[in-house]
Amino acid sequence: MKEPAAAAGVTWGVPWSRGELSRGELSALYLRGTADGSRLPLQSRPAAYWPDGSIKWSFHSAVCPEGSAEGYMLEQSAEAEAVQPGMRVSVQETEEAYVVDTGTIVCTVIKRGAGMISRIIRRVPADAGGANDNHGHSGVEKAVFVEGTASAGETPPVELLVCSGSELVCLREHRDHLSGRLTLTQERFAGVTRKAAVEEAGPLRAVITLEGRHRSSSGAREWIPFTVRLYFYAGLESIRLVHTFHYDGNPHEDFIKGLGIRFKVPLRGPLYNRHVRLAGSEGMFSESPKTLHTRRTKGKYADMFAAQLEGQRLAFDAEADAYFTGLLQDSAVWDSFRLLQDSSEHYTVHKRTGPACSWVKGAEGRRAGGLGYLGSEGGGLAAGVKNFWRKFPSGLELAGAAGDEGALTVWFWSPEAPAMDLRHYDTKTHVESSYEGAEELRATPYGIANTSELTLWCMAETPDSAALLRMQAYADEPPLLICGPEYYHRSRAFGLWSLPDRSTPAKAYLEERLDGIIAFYQAEIEQRKWYGLWDYGDFMHSYDPVRHVWNYDLGGCAWQNAELVPNMWLWVSFLRSGRADIFRMAEAMTRHTSEVDVYHFGEYAGLGSRHNVVHWGCGCKEARIAMAGLHRYYYYLTGDERTGDIMDSVKDADYSTVTLDPMRAYFPKDEFPTHARVGPDWAAFSSNWMTRWERYEDTFYRDKILTGIGCIKNANLRLISGPTYGYDPKTGILSPMGDDNWGRHLAICMGGPQAWFELAMMLEDPEWEDMLAEFGVFYNLPEEEKNAVAGGAITGKLRFEHPVLSVAIAAYGAWYKDDRATADRCWNILLNNPFGLVNLQEQQTRVTYMEELDEIGWMNTNEASQWSLNTIIALELIAEALPERDSGGAERGTAVE
């Protein structure tokens, strides 16, 4: 989506139509630049399969050169494009470590025990010289030669030790309330790896996974499980890290005070040739433990000072510069520097000379760039954090700059901020007053997770400011290759959805409204500051126009937590447009909902928490929040292994409902192990199983789907029956419990139809397709027609609530059965909904809360999400029934009731 400013490693997914690509053809694919015809080799692997064994999704990795083509074509040759020997990444395994060689860096990753990386060597061609040489200083003669290797007759490269160790760091705050006094103490923990694996070993990309826990300094306790993945690409000097931590403490006793990764950096040469850099909102905080700034810095020394701030190496003449070097001897030595992003709107930079002295504020601003650098004459390390200010309170710390070994610490939770408080907002639930989902208080963070990303650069010399700013931009928005919307649509990636079409006034009218809803939420994220480590990516549920705020404190009306699948709305909006800004919204929501809103272990493993003031606060723990169908978009588009782990972990989520029956408030324990509604419960299970089946060709989970479908086929009214069944996870059997249960709208608004449409493409079962269509047509029939079809088995209007939620499956029914009356009902529902009637920009009013705000008093994310998603699907299936509009926007023709 974003052209790389420098050589970049990219991994992305490509969908294929059934039968289009066989397994044997995958290795012969290569990339061809559309502008210059250049050919790039690929590292490819299958990601999902069609039932006939052909490739459904494939993953590809490539190294795109600096200034690479605006676009590429994926093409097939008679044989695989060869990867040149000098452009390979290799992984060697020893008893203690994996040694990864990209050709530019050699990184030793510890396989077990304390630490993460034991060292990183940066290679520099022997004849390269110093690119930043200045003022008579030449070459890299102060660098340390480590273990140069070269072919016969070649001069070995200079090898610089730029990292001498790293560790994962956790600080626990303990609170004692004694004699009315609060005493705070801190305990330090460091990561200990228990399991390591190589997931990919080249030739273009290598991936290493480390899993473990944080152990206290005394060794008495281990907690906070972690997973870290390290990504290496051939020829590159950078390493991408994806860091996940899980919470397994007691929120009333275990407060995380700090959490991060520390890298040790060898430092060599005079203090004035050592450099610290911290990215601000626009530029760089550029200093040294010994800057050339004195009250006598004038003339050539002022020029040298400017060169120092750009990272250029300096040299002084012992006689001619004796007076000035004497001044430098007298000036302060600044040993440590830190940046704290304490909110989305504020950061500070401080520095100090030593532990016995105070911190001095050096800068203050709004949104830091999230990149830090520490280095000297022998090279250094730069670390850039994705979404740094968006996931506050974050921090960067550069310590020990005056010694032989410094430390660069990336803080995902800065210890300079108040400790994490994961307790619930109250000691009881509020079901009636606040729309909370259950009388039981199950507000536990035990088992939730959070994932952050950073990029580490291993530098042979200190980059200038422009280069550092390019690195910062790369870390925050890494480049990604994507297919065009038309290709995604043609391959039926993720089922049924439409491409934008403004060919008629009526279609243009709907596209304007779809764009307007996206624009509203983009503005609202910024206006309402929906940021923070535990919040970023989520939207809020519904609005309070009296206070001019979203219902941040009203139980089930606060955070959305994937309710009514806004994830799917955002991802489909990206697929049909190719817009990078929508991709980033969907990516952030996926990272949040798949980690924070989901339980990854413990009593509720495989389930997620319904919407609440606190993301894990609701007593309803359900499979729909954690289902693979919400997250597989991101997985297949990017190849993100962490998301793959999460989808693997929910394959048996149905077993967790035995412990916590989703229908326990309505159906007491009976002869069934548990209960499941055909949707959202069984729909979520089938989404998990379909994903497992297509990824691994695991027919056990295909058969669980077929068992459930067989039970539904045998029900009195097929899919219209229920929607609640007795359920046995061991057999997958759904046992009928009648046809007049409440809640059919929940069967179709939580992603069920979207999963089932794609499942229909895989199964090619006409009866399953007919069942979907039958349900869609039935949902909005007049009452007398429903009674005629169901023989009076279903009573009451409350059995088919909220028609706007039904439009996707109703449009499918209209398309499948060529039913114009149902199509007309769909458009009547959509066009007479508030989102279909108005332009949101025209609905906003300027109000004053604590600050001036733009608001729409009737806004709610449930309907915004469902109206948008269902409109996009209706435009694909029943566009020919869309009532015409004149050029002024007025509707012509009347849809049936």
Image (cartoon, grey):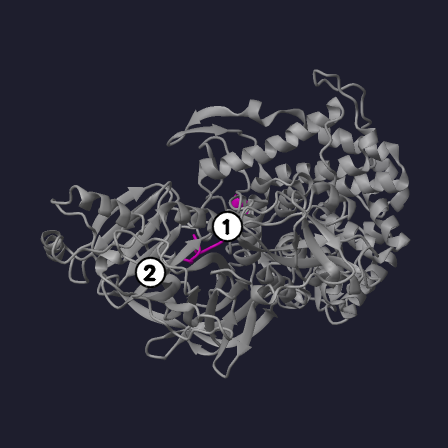
For disc 1, the marked residue is 6
For disc 2, the marked residue is 139
Q: Overall secondary structure of the magenta stretch?
A: loop
Range covered by the magenta-colored residues: 421-434
Is 112 or 455 nearer to us in this picture?
A: 455
Q: Residue furthest bottom?
A: 95
In the image, which disc is placed on residue 634? none
Q: Position of residue 806 (x, y in %)?
A: 74, 41
Q: From what the image shows, is residue 92 above or below residue 392?
A: below
Q: Amino acid at mark 2?
A: Gly
Q: Position of residue 61 (x, y in %)?
A: 62, 59
Quadrant in the picture for the C terminus? top right
Among numbered discs 1 and 2, the one appearing first in the sequence: 1
Q: Amino acid at mark 1?
A: Ala
Q: CA distance from mark 1 to mark 2?
A: 24 Å
Mark 2 element type: loop
Mark 1 element type: loop
- Is residue 571 in view from this perspective? yes
Quadrant hosting residue 181: bottom left
Foreground: disc 1 or disc 2: 2
Residue at position x 53%, y 25% in the image: 844
